Structures are given as structure tokens and as C-alpha cells.
Amino acid sequence: MALGWKGVGVLGSAFVFKTLLMSYSGALYAPTIGAYFRKYRDCVKNDMFEIKDAKKEYYYIDTSDYMNYGNKDLHDGYHSHHGP
């Protein structure tokens, strides 16, 4: 048998084995996953914008007032050179 056909045979066998293993695993864990989804049904949000993440809101940087100053607002304490 040619090298290419051996590779195709190995890949086909791997696909069949993976498919059988996934169907068995799906049937085995379906009740557990179903119970998990039923338990947390009240926490599900249909709209992505309804989800509030406290950690993300804590680290959010408000850029609405970014560089909203002029030369009159700056004084000698705001420059970076403090040498002689």
C-alpha cells in the first residue's frame, strides 16, 4: 500500500475512533451538563450587553476627559524637568 493511502487510512481510523468516543462521552455527560444548565438557568443572559463584570468596570479607564486642558491650566508643577 502506498504511503499516502496509509496516511489516509490512519486519519480515517482516527476520525472514526474520535467520533465514537465523543458520542459515548456526550451520552455519558449529558445528564450532568443538563443539570448544570437547569441549576443556573436564572443567571443566563440573552443579550451580551446585559452582562455586568465588576472586575472589568473596576479597571475601566474613563477617557471622556482625556487631554481636556490648555496652557492656562498648566503651571510649573506639571512639567517634567525639575532640575537646575
Image (cartoon, grey):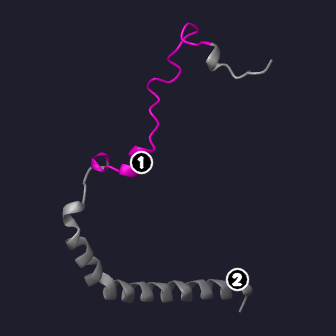
Residue 15 image point, x, y percent? 52, 83
From which residue to which does the magenta span run? 49-75
**Residue at 20 percent of width and 66 percent of height:** 41
Q: Which residue is mark 2?
A: 4
Placement of the C terminus among the 4 image quadrants: top right
Q: Quadrant of residue 11?
A: bottom right
Q: Quadrant of residue 2?
A: bottom right
**Residue at 41 percent of width and 45 percent of height:** 58
Question: Which label is found at residue 56?
Answer: 1
Amino acid at dot 2: Gly
Ranked by sequence position, the earlier of labels 2 and 1 is 2
Q: Quadrant of residue 31?
A: bottom left
Mark 1 neighbour density, 10 Å: few (under 14) some (14–19) many (20 or more): few
Q: Is residue 61 left or right of residue 37?
A: right
Residue 61 image point, x, y percent? 47, 36
Tag 2's secondary structure?
Answer: helix
Q: Main secondary structure of the magenta part?
A: loop
Q: Is residue 50 above or below residue 25?
A: above
Comparing 9 with 51, the one in front is 51
